[in-house]
Image (cartoon, coloured by chain):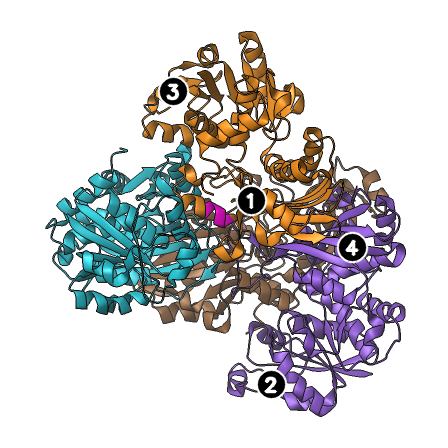
Chain colours: A orange, B cyan, C purple, D brown
Amino acid sequence: MVKVGVAGYGVIGQRLADGVALQKDMELVGIADLAPTLSIRALKERGMPYDLYLVEGADKSKFDANGIPVKGNFADLIGKVDIMLDSSPGGVGAKNKALYEKAGIKAVFQGGEKDSVADVFFHGYANYEKGVGARFLKLTSCNTTGLIRSVDCLDRRYGIDRVAITIIRRVADPGDYHRGLTNALQMDKAPSHQAVDLMTIMPHVEATGILVHTPVTHGHIITVVAHAKTGKITRDMALEAFKAHNRIRVVRLEDGFLGNASFFRYARDLGNPRGDMYEIGLWEDSIVESGDNIMYAINIPQESVTIPETMDAIRAAMKMQGDSASGTAETNKYLGLGKWK
Amino acid sequence: MVKVGVAGYGVIGQRLADGVALQKDMELVGIADLAPTLSIRALKERGMPYDLYLVEGADKSKFDANGIPVKGNFADLIGKVDIMLDSSPGGVGAKNKALYEKAGIKAVFQGGEKDSVADVFFHGYANYEKGVGARFLKLTSCNTTGLIRSVDCLDRRYGIDRVAITIIRRVADPGDYHRGLTNALQMDKAPSHQAVDLMTIMPHVEATGILVHTPVTHGHIITVVAHAKTGKITRDMALEAFKAHNRIRVVRLEDGFLGNASFFRYARDLGNPRGDMYEIGLWEDSIVESGDNIMYAINIPQESVTIPETMDAIRAAMKMQGDSASGTAETNKYLGLGKWK
Amino acid sequence: MVKVGVAGYGVIGQRLADGVALQKDMELVGIADLAPTLSIRALKERGMPYDLYLVEGADKSKFDANGIPVKGNFADLIGKVDIMLDSSPGGVGAKNKALYEKAGIKAVFQGGEKDSVADVFFHGYANYEKGVGARFLKLTSCNTTGLIRSVDCLDRRYGIDRVAITIIRRVADPGDYHRGLTNALQMDKAPSHQAVDLMTIMPHVEATGILVHTPVTHGHIITVVAHAKTGKITRDMALEAFKAHNRIRVVRLEDGFLGNASFFRYARDLGNPRGDMYEIGLWEDSIVESGDNIMYAINIPQESVTIPETMDAIRAAMKMQGDSASGTAETNKYLGLGKWK
Amino acid sequence: MVKVGVAGYGVIGQRLADGVALQKDMELVGIADLAPTLSIRALKERGMPYDLYLVEGADKSKFDANGIPVKGNFADLIGKVDIMLDSSPGGVGAKNKALYEKAGIKAVFQGGEKDSVADVFFHGYANYEKGVGARFLKLTSCNTTGLIRSVDCLDRRYGIDRVAITIIRRVADPGDYHRGLTNALQMDKAPSHQAVDLMTIMPHVEATGILVHTPVTHGHIITVVAHAKTGKITRDMALEAFKAHNRIRVVRLEDGFLGNASFFRYARDLGNPRGDMYEIGLWEDSIVESGDNIMYAINIPQESVTIPETMDAIRAAMKMQGDSASGTAETNKYLGLGKWK
């Protein structure tokens, strides 16, 4: 059993912990955080299913005052795990890395950290093999993770050499009060970092794109114009590839999937914990041909989309499986991905 | 075991079914709906935990085409239950009533129906006794249900004779695409129907109020200015009463409950199915005195707040418990209300 | 002086009237509407700068009750004009057409009508010549009008043969209460009608695209991936072309044009009537190359963008100028377009 | 002619400058700012109707690079004026005060500064006389200004001794990208500062209230529950008082004033510069009686509502008129307030 810890129990950290808890070949040793946030209070109200450790700077008396049991400090947690999933606020992970190095454990960082924090910039499908046995991995961000799933899906079958993307980005998560946008679309400087990151992970693809922030909370939507190295990818060819993928849900407008909020509602109706969905959505009705290019739109559930690929990262780093096919298959099995087909 | 059916598996119907399923002294016989909506598709993906019956007008071939098992038609369901929870779209419940009458079963209608559909306009705390043994009950709407909880809570202890409310109403539910408001507040004609409805349920209270729609989806916020028949309710007196109530969560800004979206996020973090919360929220930091009046603000989780009082309604109608104290206590026990204290 | 009337004094109709009033070679005879809307009330409060005529079905007593002077009925207005700008609600224009035919006047319809209402589907730059002397013209919709401006701009210089667009659509106008979207992105069936319409106006271009509705009110944003028939359009080539266009404002993020709402604010700060802007915005920072394609993002001020091209349509229909260059130049002169350079 | 300067050409500063320019007994000497913001760029595009002076820290080369003419520095402007309207960002006004003191000029600060910056916390109707001849005045904030207008209106006729308010606050202005809220209502600690400020200006009134932020940009809505010292204010009595006020627009839902965005749209349709409105709106349909209390709802156009009272402040400070009646009458005359009746 690979022993796993989670540093930073925020939006991503909570879901990483839940994800690890579902992997029967991993053990979630505990989670670490700084303050008795709402998420930590909820953990207490749930009866502490995960042990809590305090990172440096935490004021234990605040936890005591709220009756929140503390198992130990961050060093204790580090001492018990083989690998840490670091979902601390951006920049903190880089500082934690020194602790991991000293303790001789591995770590997987999230998209908020700089690429330089890690040896490998990782995606479970597109470059799993690079992560095998690596010590420090960094996951692609939520948009890039979902985008690469879809581009890699076409690339494996038909060979992609160019994509131009438009990211319609959600600006906050449900419950966020520290950031927001009101009645405005906001433009980012092009090219978007997601396009640049895609090229790092998939160096044989030329990518560029434009990102626009929108005042919503339930999922990004990305349109992709993709070009095949040779030949033309027809609508049917694209659809066939997407439908076969275990982390892509192909949906239709006529069935009621009208937008990003439909996926959120559907996941709630499924009874998924937190109303989360691991799969990206892909609208069958959005696929159109443009000359030799194929164009389509996907939905990225930003809070949970990176969880499967992070599980893949553990598998790669800990050499639990040696290639993408077997690594992702194990993750999918434990997360129930593809069983809805 | 009281046998219960649910007509209309929408936002409310789904939650009614889940609520009944948690009551160990009730049996959920099945649910009825018209079309293979996203909610019905989710039911299928979950493995049909509830049997599905089709109401008149449903096209069974559409369910077959999606592989959704159908147990029977609406008449079949009616024939098997003691009481129906009718959460059909507004107006349909009134038509269904004839079927219930013919079959000799009881029914509880939701707030969308006209008051005339029912013998008793019902609230689990404020007028439970009127519902005991009644045949047709109608629940108060979401806002009114939560509002009355808080006013009744003060009324029992201190005697309320007047309230003036301001309802800051959420305009849609998460995932709604058939209604919405964009960058606008919308004023309703005063007095709001919630104030009028409160007077129907609590005839000794004079109530009025103003309702403003806001472009959000996670919970209404209501401010209440309440006046006691005799004496003055101090901040401490109000707080003590609210804290003792099992369907009111008293929270603080400093703990991270910053607004309606915090409750939604907290419920998701709790792992509550659909990210739902049955309790209304009440901000300790909002309670202020104004002359002889006490003023406070509450949060109404619109999708789920009426579920407990609907369970109460079944208990009253079926004479499972004869008074509010014992009826609400049973509901609270099965829904886990108050256990977080 | 060409005599012009405006039928339908709503969001577009008001701006058409203002636009005509600025053309020194045209006379605005009057406007026609059905009810004392806020816009008509505002007209009255402004002292009736434009004469008001009532369309069939209008209740004159309601205007009288509000002290709003009425000049005559729709037939009176039709009898006084050479050409009618019909911005009635969708479908009404088609009915009005019979009146215009009978009276022997010309008409320009807006995007809400079906293409079949008109002899020519018109854009001031892309196919002005087709409209010269035509009797019934229909303007492209707001998005299509702005999109074609930018594509035609590149096409004239470099020859475009293919575009793939992503439309990030605003869902309502400021002050709209009859439509809206709350915390949701909504997907449309692809290809978007704007892409199809572009091909009607510019038949030598293959166009497709995806449209996503967003809950904002201040301007659509469109990303365009454009391909040249021969050679490659570099970033500098595109920028040079865009900067030379009198109806395109090239802006930069660093100057404070952060999104669609910046244009709205800027137009207000300029003191433009209604805070309107006739130009589309184009972000210099959005222009990127993708293989042989050029990609860029534009902002469409939906309420006012079609006004200049509608003035062009009058010029074409009435043979005031015989080609696009001279027709658009006259419109630009009177609307002050390009003078900010 | 009283010579006036404006320090800080932001949302409020621009409108102060426009307001002063309309007062025929005042001269706008110029405005001062720090950077070539969009507002300053718009000033340039308009042909510099107001002279621009640079405050300390400004980089003149940036203005030169954009071809924006600069008349002098802040000291030059201070040297030319009798009184400065300081609408600098919060906290800067307090620093500027030393410059004003040294130069022997008077100043009016906006709501963002601390009360201690001024000798008198001022409202044109409620305490004009306290400002007569005063050296440093501070205006009430936008919400407080509009709120006091309505409470003072009732107080003058009927004597008010208590109010309880609920503020439904817009969270950003149109075009704001530095603050925002997405799909969330946010609660503030009670009592709201507006209630506290009201008591400072109107010490004979006991006030309290709750403020909730909402994700919209077009105007705050406030509900007020007001109590008369003696007797009861009926709906008709309140309506009569409100209708007689020159800075209150009484409107009806049935006429199309559906919410805060209707006022914004109406002001645009009026052709008001920037789509601004100086009056607060008051819904006739919102007025209801609650025991001895009267309850009503008002709309506060946050960007422009303080302009009239700031003009009043100049009149008081410079002893142009000696009492509220004559001071506000002059302001109203030049701003056209009340002429729409």
To the question of a shared chain for discs 1 and 3, the answer is yes
Quadrant of the rendered structure where residue A227 is?
top right
Name the chain letter of the residue that bears numbered label 1: A
Q: Which residue is mark 3?
A: A51
Q: Which residue is mark 2?
A: C54
Q: Which residue is mark 1?
A: A243
Q: SS class of the residue under badge 1?
A: helix
To the question of a shared chain for discs 2 and 4, the answer is yes
Q: What's the residue type where badge 3 is placed? A: Asp
Q: Nearer the viewer, mark 1 or mark 3?
A: 1
Q: What's the residue type where badge 4 is placed? A: Arg
Of the numbered discs in the image, which one, if any, rests on residue D68? Answer: none
Q: Earlier in the sequence, mark 2 or mark 4?
A: 2
Q: Which residue is mark 4?
A: C162
Can the viewer see residue A46? yes
Which quadrant holds the N terminus of chain A?
A: top left
Between B202 and C49, the one lying in front of the other is B202
Q: From the viewer's perspective, is B341 left or right of C124?
A: left
